[in-house]
Structure formats: structure tokens, C-alpha cells
Amino acid sequence: MNHSKFLSIVVITVGLLATAGSVWTQSKTYKPQAKVEAKTGKPLVTFIELGSVKCIPCRMMQPVMQAIEKKYGDQINVVFYDVWTPAQQHYAAVYRIRVIPTQVFLNKEGKELFRHEGFFPEAEIDKLLQKHGLKVRRGG
């Protein structure tokens, strides 16, 4: 690749990152958690998002996580681990991830139901959750 093509790719990438960063600041950020803690009552599924607040595809997952949490209420426990922080990097090994973002879905006994690497669209997560018995709550 010649120098001008490389420079063009870098400029485009920086522009995309700046644009995505401004969109990101408009949404709620999930706070990394020290451990998976169930909500009152036992959720049917725990949705664990392993990523970083500095990763663009991970940032794109934030509104998806919010929507899923709102739609399914206490049927689901949504957890975010920022595996690029020293305090939470060990979760990358615990969940044996290869890339970020990675989503891991656990049943109420803590056994893995499903995992996905990369951005995971909300509609696809809905199909997965409904297959495992979760119902969209009213107003969700």
C-alpha cells in the first residue's frame, strides 16, 4: 500500500472515531461491575458484555444493553465488564474471550447458554432471549 492510501485510511478512521465518540456521549454508560450480582429474585438469563468503554463496537453495544434491560426487566441481569481496565482484565480469562466485544449469556444456574463475538444487534438478542423463555414486558 502506498503512503497516500495509508494516510487516507488513517484520516477516514480518525473521522469515524470522532463521529462515533460524539454519538457515544449521548447514551448511558454501563458501569463495570466487580462481580455478577443477581437482581431481586433470580433472573432467567444473565447477559454479560465483555468489552471496553474505549472500543467503538463496544460503545455501540451500550444502547443495545439498555434496551434489552428495559424490555425484559428483572427476567435478565445485564452486566458490563471493561476488560481493558486493570481491575477487570481478569474477566477476559474467566470468560475465555478472544475479541471484544464478546457477549456471554448464562442461564439462572450460571451455565453458558450462548456466546457471540462482535457487535450483536438487538433484534438478534431478542430472538435468543425469547427462545430461552423471556417475554418482552409491557412498556418495554
Image: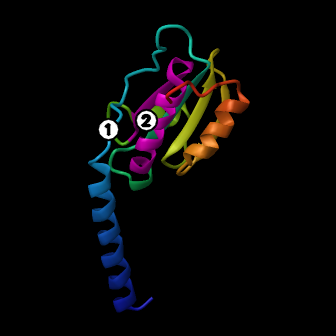
Q: Using the image, determine if residue 5 lies above or below residue 26.
A: below
Tag 1 secondary structure: loop
N-terminal of the two: label 2 or label 1?
Answer: 1
Q: Using the image, determine if residue 103 lies above or below residue 58.
A: above
Q: Name the residue under label 1.
A: 28
Q: What residue type is labelled 2?
A: Gln
Q: Is residue 59 left or right of residue 46?
A: left
Quick check: is 72 in the magenta stretch? yes
Q: Nearer the viewer, residue 94 or 24?
A: 24
Q: Give the range drawn in magenta.
A: 58-83
Q: Using the image, determine if residue 36 lies above or below residue 60.
A: above
Mark 1 residue crowding within 10 angstroms, few (<14) / some (14–19) / many (20+): few
Residue at (27, 64) in percent of width and height: 18
Q: Where is residue 133 in the image (x, y as percent from the top left)?
A: 70, 24
**In whole angstroms, how far apart are the C-alphas of marks 2 and 1?**
8 Å
The circle drawn on residue 66 is: 2
Tag 2 secondary structure: helix
Label 2 close to label 1 by CB (< 8 Å): yes
Quick check: is 103 in the magenta stretch? no
Q: How is the image coloured?
A: rainbow
Q: Residue furthest right?
A: 131
